[in-house]
Image (cartoon, rainbow, N blue to C red):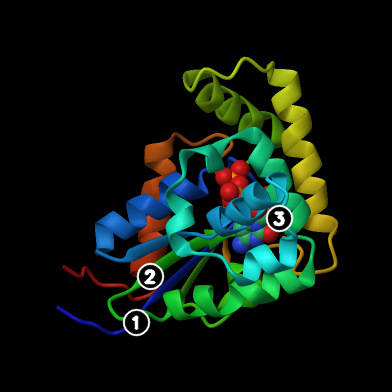
């Protein structure tokens, strides 16, 4: 058993499969996992409740990440609006960097993990899929939670968020030079997970536990 840090950095657009892949990698290698989107969602939720975004980010309590409301589509849009503010991103940086180097290994998923948060991550992935495939996956997830929006609405949401995330000046979403590109459009989730684990293993990760 080793306590050495090992960072797996995973970026990509909404509903590409990052969350499932990150959780599977964390479980396989015995690493800790941080869904960094939850930080922006938590700030977005506080702003919907009337808070000022920069102050909300600076005072964010990691316990706020457990709230089920953070998974709603309304909060996702609010998250991508606060995520364009450089001071919001700066306020969340140290927490993410410290998590990346915690002893025993860490998986972080988001939009700027490879490019900004921890560019020296030992293993880097950019997980993507076509907007149509991603919208269909997200629509299915939302429907299982009782959300009644149409597939067309969900596709429009995904496209609006893709545009905001990749066109912003502060840490725009883009594949890092050293990241392995994983297009999951035509893959089952098992195939995508296997490909991601094989990449992390090839980069030298060993099982912890
Ligand atoms: O789960 P999904 O991919 O739909 O979204 P998320 O990962 O929870 O991220 C919500 C929003 O937070 C994104 O649309 C981004 O605007 C923002 N975000 C970011 O800017 N940087 C990150 N590292 C993670 C999320």
2 vs 3, front mark: 3
Q: Quadrant of residue 206?
A: bottom left
Q: Position of residue 165 (x, y in %)?
A: 76, 54
On screen, residue 82 versus residue 104, left or right, reads right
Identity of the residue drawn at 64% across and 34% down: 73
Q: How far apart are marks 2 and 1 (CA)?
A: 7 Å
Q: Crowdedness of circle 3 by 10 Å Cα count: few (<14), some, many (20+)?
A: some
Residues at discs 2 and 1 in contact (Cβ within 8 Å):
yes
* Place of residue 15 in the rendered image (x, y in percent of width and height, measured from the top left): 58, 40
Residue 140 against residue 173 in the figure, above or below: above
Query: What numbered label is drawn on residue 138?
Result: none
Residue 158 in sight? yes
Residue assigned mark 2: 106
**Mark 1 element type:** loop
Residue under the point 52% across and 17% down: 146
Residue for badge 3: 51
The label number, if any, that marks residue 5 in the structure image: 1
Query: Upstream in the sequence, badge 2 or badge 3?
Result: 3
Q: In which quarter of the image is the N terminus?
A: bottom left
Camera-side residue of 64 and 206: 64
Q: Assess mark 3: CB under 8 A from ligand 1?
A: no
Label 1 CA crowd tier, 10 Å (few <14, some 14–19, many 20+)? some
The front one of 19 and 51 is 51
Q: Which of the image's four quarters has the C terminus?
A: bottom left
Viewer-side label of 1, 3? 3
**Which of the 4 quarters of the picture holds residue 63?**
bottom left
């Amino acid at each position: 058993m080793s306590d050495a840090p090992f960072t797996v950095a995973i970026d990509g657009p909404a509903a590409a499969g990052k969350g499932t892949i990150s959780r599977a990698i964390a479980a396989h290698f015995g690493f800790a996992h941080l869904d960094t989107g939850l930080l922006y969602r938590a700030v977005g939720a506080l702003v919907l409740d009337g808070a000022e975004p920069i102050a909300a980010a600076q005072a964010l309590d990691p316990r706020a990440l457990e709230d089920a409301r953070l998974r709603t589509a309304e909060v996702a849009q609010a998250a991508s609006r606060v995520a364009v503010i450089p001071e919001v991103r700066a306020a969340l940086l140290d927490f993410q960097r410290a998590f990346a180097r915690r002893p025993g290994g860490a998986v972080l998923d988001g939009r700027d993990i490879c490019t900004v948060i921890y560019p020296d991550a030992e293993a880097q992935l950019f997980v993507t899929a076509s907007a149509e495939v991603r919208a269909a996956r997200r629509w299915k997830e939302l429907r299982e939670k009782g959300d009644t929006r149409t597939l067309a609405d969900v596709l429009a949401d995904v496209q609006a968020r893709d545009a905001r995330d990749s066109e912003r000046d502060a840490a725009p979403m883009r594949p890092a030079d050293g990241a392995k590109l994983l297009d999951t459009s035509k893959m089952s989730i098992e195939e995508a997970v296997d490909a991601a684990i094989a990449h992390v293993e090839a980069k030298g990760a060993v099982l912890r536990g």
